[in-house]
Amino acid sequence: MTTTNSIIVSERIAENLATRRAADELFDFVQATPYKTVTLDFKSVKFSSRSFAHEYLIRKKDIDKKVVEKNMSVPVRKMFKLVSKESAKAQHIVATSFRSVSLSAKSF
């Protein structure tokens, strides 16, 4: 059995990757393959939305296979990098204290 497989994303999903559902469909397919390593070939992919990139990165982190990207265009790569940085920043925000505020009519 071969341990690696290549999937052409534009043929499997679309040239314009716009929704979280598209990322879910892609990773559901990847998960169903018998391969330990899957290469996702982004040739002919023209666009990725923030939603797609965010869901893609979440699913990639959680999958039990090695996922490798190739042939990502500069705009698509930039979107993935932007979303990755935003996710890292969001993880660093921690609330340190809370103060309760009464909103009842009596307090006015």
Image (cartoon, rainbow, N blue to C red):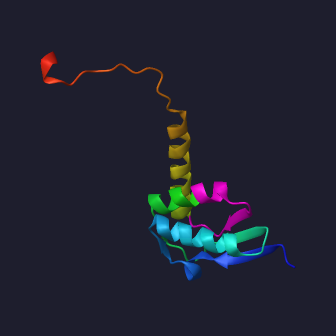
Q: Residue furthest bottom?
A: 11
Instruction: Tell whether 40 sits left or right of 5.
Output: left
Quadrant in which the N terminus appears: bottom right
Q: Is residue 58 visible?
A: yes
* 14 vs 86: above or below: below
Residue drawn at point x = 73 percent, y = 70 percent: 38
Q: Does residue 50 appear left or right of residue 41 in this picture?
A: left
Residue 48 can be seen, yes or no: no
Q: Residue at x 71, y 64 (%)?
A: 68
- Start-end of magenta stretch: 58-73
Question: Is 69 inside the magenta-drawn segment?
Answer: yes
Q: Position of residue 104 (x, y in %)?
A: 18, 24
Tell me residue 32's x, y (percent): 69, 74
Q: How many marks?
A: 0
Q: Is residue 71 magenta?
A: yes
Q: Residue at x 45, y 67 (%)?
A: 19
Q: Residue 47, position in %: x, y?
A: 47, 69
The front one of 105 and 33 is 105
Residues 73 and 26: in front is: 26
Q: In what quadrant of the picture does the C terminus appear?
A: top left
Residue under the image location 48 percent in, 22 percent down:
96
- Residue 89 screen position, x and y as percent: 52, 38
